[in-house]
Amino acid sequence: MEPVIFDRSDGQELRINMIGSWLKRYFGRKVVKLSIDGGFTCPNRDGSKGRGGCLFCSDSGSGDMAAGSGDIFTDLDQQITLLQDKWPEAAYLAYFQSHTSTYAPAESLRGKFRAALSHPKVQGLAVATRPDCINEEVLDLLEALNRETFLWVELGLQSTHPETMRDMNLCYTLADYDEAVRSLCSRGIRVVTHLILGLPGETEEMMLDSVRHVCRPVPVPGTEDGHIFGLKLHMLNVVRNSAFPSEYPGYVPFDSIEEYTGLVIRCLELVPPDITIHRISGDAPRPVLIAPEWSWRKRTILNMIHRRMRELNTWQGKNCGI
Ligand code: SF4
């Protein structure tokens, strides 16, 4: 079988459908994602679904790098000004990253998303949320936005296994996720799914099962079965400002980078080639990171994965029918 090569930029053969390359082809120039804290909270923190949040979630709502002064336009403008010299021709996506970015009345959401889109250099939106926070009003708003700008919606799933979901205090179900994907896809909205590798109690086969589940065709009446648009895979990052360390003291998700990168490659082999890959490592800030202590070495991890895939002569999707 001939390997599938997605990109040959920088003198390298990339065997993964990385979102950076995809966006560059789609927009015809470099695209930079700017993390924004839209001032949302989360139903797993305010008591409507749970308290304390998902065990691994930092007190910033997994948005440690996000700007959040309360003025969305200004936060974006400041980030763009800082990047202007480095990438003068770049386009930007506003990434509503922190907490649950659809957890507010639709009117309030509309104001925040419109504020981001009012910046002349912002060409689209990425909205991160939970699978149980996509109601009809939100869907109507997202569908309207999707018609006029570039949009994807990120759904934190993390695992498809009920016992893991319970132990990690996620307070949503796999059925919530399946329904959210079906609803978003039926309105033509791109979906990006998050999975975490290395959660306590999960074997490799369980993690591969989660990958298989989220990569299944999505049954949308009246259309050919499609897929989710993208996938984010990352290792569990044990961070100080979360509940995880006190519940699982001393827990280390992977013994070595090699163990993690080998697993990522076996996951990617199951992912259909047209699904874009948005992340294959973690990005917890070093000051709060407890384990794995190497997880901040993102560039090293990526290079190891790319190099090992060439050595093994494998690629994303090699085993996707299996
Ligand atoms: S990971 Fe997401 S859903 Fe879980 S507590 Fe944090 S913001 Fe809420």
Image (cartoon, helix red, strand yellow):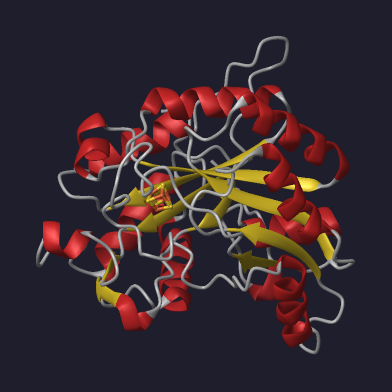
Left/right placement of residue 5 relative to residue 209 reads right
Residue 252 appears in the picture as rendered: no
Within the image, what quadrant is residue 206 found in? top left
Above or below residue 65? Residue 101 is above
Within the image, what quadrant is residue 21 found in? bottom right
x and y percent of residue 204 in the render? Answer: 24, 44
Left/right placement of residue 15 relative to residue 112 reads left
Residue closest to the far bottom: 85
x and y percent of residue 105 in the render? Answer: 63, 39
| Number of numbered discs overlaid on the protein picture | 0
**Which image quadrant: the C terminus?**
top left
Q: Nearer the viewer, residue 268 or 32?
A: 32
Residue closest to the far top: 222
Residue 66 appears in the picture as rendered: yes
Q: Nearer the viewer, residue 164 or 207?
A: 164
Above or below residue 88? Residue 201 is above
Q: Nearer the viewer, residue 262 or 89?
A: 89
Left/right placement of residue 271 relative to residue 170 reads right
x and y percent of residue 174 in the render? Answer: 38, 27
What's the residue at 55%, 43% (across, down)?
A: 103
Left/right placement of residue 92 relative to residue 206 reads right
What's the residue at 37%, 64% (across, down)?
A: 59
Q: Nearer the viewer, residue 306 or 162?
A: 162
What's the residue at 62%, 49% (across, down)?
A: 127
What's the residue at 63%, 19% (across, down)?
A: 225
x and y percent of residue 80 in the render? Answer: 76, 78
